[in-house]
Image (tube, grey):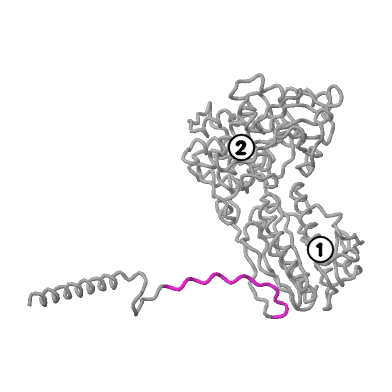
Amino acid sequence: MDDGHPVDHGTAYTMKQKCLPTYLVIDASYSMTPYQVTLNQTLEQLHRTLSESPRVSEFAYMSIIAFSTAAQVVIEMTDMEAIPAMPEVVCNGRTDYRAAFDLVRNRIDVDVPALTAQGKAVLRPAMFFLTDGQPTEPGWEEAFRNLIAPAWKRHPHVITYGFGSVQSEVLSKVATKAAFYAEPGTNHDAALTQAINSLLNSLVASSRAEEMQIPTVAEGYRTIPVEYMD
Amino acid sequence: MTGRAWHLPAVVTLDDLGPLEKTISDGAGQSTGIHPVTEHPGWLAKLYRTRGGPEDANRLDGLIALPGTVTSEVARTLRTSTSWPVARIAEQESQALGCVLPAAPDKYRWDGAGASARFREVDWLAKPDDAFARRNYRVPSRSDRLRVCRNLVVVAEVLERHKLVYSDWSYSNAFWCDTDASVFVIDIDGCGPGAVPNIFQPNWDDPLTQRPNKADAYTDRYRVALLVTRCLTGQRDLASALNVLAESDGLGNRGLREILLDILLSEQRERRPSMAALATVIAGGLYVRLGPRPARSAIPARPAPSFPKTGAGSATRAGQNVKWPEPAAEPAPPTPSTSGGGQGDPGRKAAAVIICLLALLIGVLMVALIASH
């Protein structure tokens, strides 16, 4: 340190770098098995794009969660540039939305304080939910209400993408900012890729604006009304 | 540098330019697009989102004329280290629809060449060495970082000397070459005399230039110092960069550390040292303060480190959906060889040679003995 006398007038250097904690929650149930290769390729592309865009990855920290019969954290909240390689997501099991929502809620309470401790100005978390099927286990509606409860100050924005056998009525109940449903006849592999591209575009725009930019369109998807509004 | 001179006038119409190719930018900034000019290879037409009036036209004309009025050294810096505009695009008098700029040379692209390769933005230089190593990119040395920063400051000093404010210093507006450490500053057509709009760039706000105040030379000094500090330290987080800088040896130049801290922490923006002073110090010269050292704000505490973690698990049971690659097995240690032919057993080879020589000698002696009888 230099030998001066730094002066703190109470308006000292307090600028913090903004950070958008982003959760990518992926359906990895048995019905996704035919698209497992595309899913993993798309995640690789996501990782590659983020890790080669320092400005985006330092703003949009990401955690990846896979769910089926249970939910598990694939990658904890981090700058994706720091992750050397993506693991393989293997599809099996049922479709337990409740497990996914409960895990995200728990992780937000861990991740947001951790990011704050790292000196970041943390924005409201964003959850991107990707599913191809109906929930198979009960309790998901209550778990979602718990996740987005206005009384919980860390409740996330939720953007949902659905294709395959999931019904639009369900999608509209598990989103707060936007819900997208694949156009009829859309190839499911293409639907997966386009959902991740939409997510990426949103993160790039968000990093430029230094605030969450909600996607308004997703190629190959139509927008459906959401039941819960922030 | 394009290697070709601009042959059209300093004010051109879109018709004069001829056909334009597809934009190379995404149109997210102050332009709707930046288009290669088909009939003038190496030149780009930047079209503004908002049509400029007389004030913008005059400002652009001043920039375009500048290289013709300065020393050859300054002109060379402007032409080779920036996308200095060479013509204003207009359909009417005193109008600025856009401008013509030189394209950045291919040496500023990753992997050297190819129109599809991305440009190497200084964004990447503001990363630690292990970020390069993880991707098998050549890791910039301390000398590389210093040389690139020096070249950035050369441009900044030229602008300040001619009373031009850029304001747009940031991660995305300069490219660097990893072989000769040269730089190419883009979006330079936004420069202006005195004060210019304070362009919003996340994480580059000058704490002593509150919006909506315009950006001026003091703002530029702050942003250049911030860019240099981030590139020298490889730290993007401001608190981390300041702490690393303060604890460093200034890359062997304590004066460099001090002048950067003076610029970044000075409580009075007017006391921030000039770009001329920074250019001198970063080139190895002494840092000489005129008057008392400016009062500095406190350096914020270093943030807690973060360690990325990945979830463990296997995919052998339903509900277990993640499979991590197996770590590469350690090579087995070499085992001693118990039979002949062991590779790398010099003792046994020497013994075999000696035995052969002895056998040969015995054979020669026996022949000699028999012959003597």
**Is residue A34 covered in magenta?**
no
Q: Residue A179: image x %, image y %?
A: 87, 62
**As shown in the figure, which amino acid type bears the numbered disc 1?**
Ala
Determine the image quadrant of residue B371: bottom left
Q: Residue B340: image x %, image y %?
A: 33, 77
Determine the image quadrant of residue B350: bottom left
Determine the image quadrant of residue B321: bottom right
User: Foreground residue, B102 or B66?
Assistant: B102
Name the magenta segment's main secondary structure. loop
User: Foreground residue, A100 or B113?
Assistant: B113
Image point (83%, 78%), residue name: A136
What is the magenta range? B317-333
Residue B289 is left or right of residue A9, and the answer is left
Tell me, for residue B121, which label it has, or none: none
For label 2, the SS is: strand
Considering every residue shown, the one lying at the far left of the view is B373
Badge 2: chain ID: B
Tell me, for residue A190, which label it has, or none: 1
Residue B112 is left or right of residue A40, and the answer is left
What is the spatial separation of the Cα atoms under label 1 and label 2, in whole angstroms?
40 Å
Tell me, for residue B183, which label it has, or none: 2
Crowd rating for badge 2 (residues with CA inside 10 Å; few <14, some 14–19, many 20+): many
For label 1, the SS is: helix
User: Foreground residue, B113 or B268?
Assistant: B113
Q: Residue A228: image x %, image y %?
A: 89, 63
